[in-house]
Amino acid sequence: MESNKDEALKCLAIAQKHRNARNFPSAKRFCQKSLTLFSTAEAVKLLQVIEVEVQESEGSSSSSAQPAGSSSAAEAHPSAAGARQRHGAESSKAEGKAKANGDAGAGGAQKKRDYTPENVAVVERVRKCKVTEYYEILALKRDCDEAEVKKAYRKLALALHPDKNGAPGADEAFKMVSKAFQVLSDPQKRSAFDQHGSDPESRFSGMSSGSGRGSPAFSRGSFGGGGGFEGEMSPEDLFNMFFGGGGMPMNGGSFGGGPFGGPMFTATFGPGGFRTTRARTNARREQQPAAESRSIWVQLLPLFLLFAFSLLNALPNLFASTPTPDPRFAFNPSPRYNVERTTGGMHVKYHVNAAEFSGHPLAAELARNENKPGPQLQKFESNVERAYTQDLFAQCQRGLDHKQRRKDQEVGLFGIGTDWAKVRKIDEEPIDSCNKLKSLGLLN
């Protein structure tokens, strides 16, 4: 089920970790568990590699056996002895479940696998197909959907699995089924195959690492080397690892420069087994800086517009002459403010400095108008009247507040024993500033 895919990929990563430690029984067990949860082409390929390495380790250990009195470095190593012990326990369990045609002899001969006529028929049907007849290999029609591809692959993978099918050619048939599923389960590869009728990756075959036009190639350690996994991986990282998406190369895989200027990934699964090559271009990497540059300019565009409008509004003020400030005045005479004047509207008396006022443009305007108020003088005197009335309002409010506090103090909390005549007297006390506002018609 699709819901088990993540768990299957995690088991596959753990199987690879045990394989790096050469703990093949545990690696095989986790790989089979991954196939049970969700069958993937990566798990199938990895299981093939583990099977080959198990057989190689069995042949090397039997051929290099020494007398009981001598001790070898492999036998003295505790990890190797533990691996053989675990492998022996795993082999005994497998022998209890299925009958073998022959046991391993003293000369290191490998065990034979059972097969049935049905197994032979499935292998022959797949082997009769060409390696690029992917639909025929999976026995599907060209208009099949993704679910049908997965269903057919699961069925054939179980029928051709090395543990269940020992017929001659089963391994090659299993590789053909895996390759067919790899192409048809990928929409892009399937579209390219439907269009050209050939392996979508064949155009890059023969290009190994470092074959890109003068671009230096570099190689990393394979899974069986000193590298390997350090902790668990996410399903996306595991997928990229197997198919050249930026992860580690598998079993001798390497990275290099491709013919289009991008990195190339080459991987080989097992000795003399399935080989795949994939190249990528740097088009996306080249487009990304340009897209980021455009987005920055788009974000800064409102700031540029705001700065431009502010500059346009400030230009008239930059080239205009600075206006002359109004002369200073006071409502009470003093040695500084020694010239008394009266506004033309409310007839408010105010005082200005003689020297300052005579040198102001207002004096020149009065001289031109023969001591009649002009527009500038009227504007100045309206400011004087506004300041005068604001000062009167403030004084009136302070006087009213003072009277209210005196009345509240005389009445007390509940008005018991209050001299109400004194309260009325306080209420009737005049406030000069309020009376002036009333005389000006600004207060009722």
Image: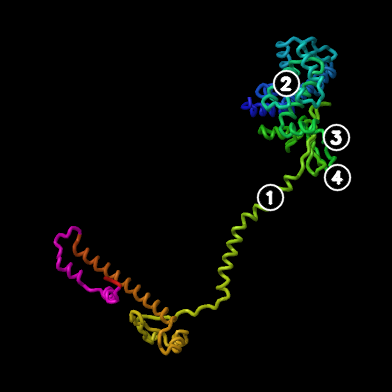
Task: Tell me, yes or no, whether the two marked residues, 4 and 3, touch with CB atoms within 8 Å.
Answer: no
Q: Quadrant of the N terminus?
A: top right
Amino acid type, residue under disc 2 in the picture: Ala
Mark positioned earlier in the residue sequence (3 or 1)? 3
Vertical relation: 88 (above or below) 275:
above
**Where is residue 215 drawn, in percent x and y?**
83, 44
Closer to the camera: disc 4 or disc 3? Answer: 3
Q: Which residue is mark 1?
A: 291
User: Relative to residue 208, is residue 82 drawn left or right?
Assistant: left
In the rendered image, which residue does mark 4 sit on? 214
Q: Amino acid at mark 4?
A: Gly
- Looking at the image, is mark 4 or mark 3 earlier in the sequence? 3
Residues 279 and 356: in front is 279
Residue range corresponding to the magenta coloring: 413-441
Q: Nearest the camera: 79 or 20?
A: 20
Q: Is residue 415 magenta?
A: yes
Mark 4–mark 2 CB contact (< 8 Å): no
Q: Quadrant of residue 194?
A: top right
User: Measuring 73% from the left and 37% from the top, which residue is drawn there?
Assistant: 245
* Eye-nearest disc, 4 or 1: 1
The answer to if 333 sits in the magenta stretch is no
Q: Earlier in the sequence, mark 2 or mark 3?
A: 2
Question: Marks 4 and 3, Cα distance to the nearest angstrom?
Answer: 16 Å
Q: Secondary structure at mark 4?
A: loop
Q: Name which residue lies at 83% across and 20% down.
A: 60
Residues under labels 3 and 1: Cα distance?
35 Å
Measure the alpha-carbon separation of dots 2 and 1.
Answer: 45 Å
SS at circle 2: helix
SS class, disc 1: helix
Please name the residue that numbered disc 2 is placed on.
157
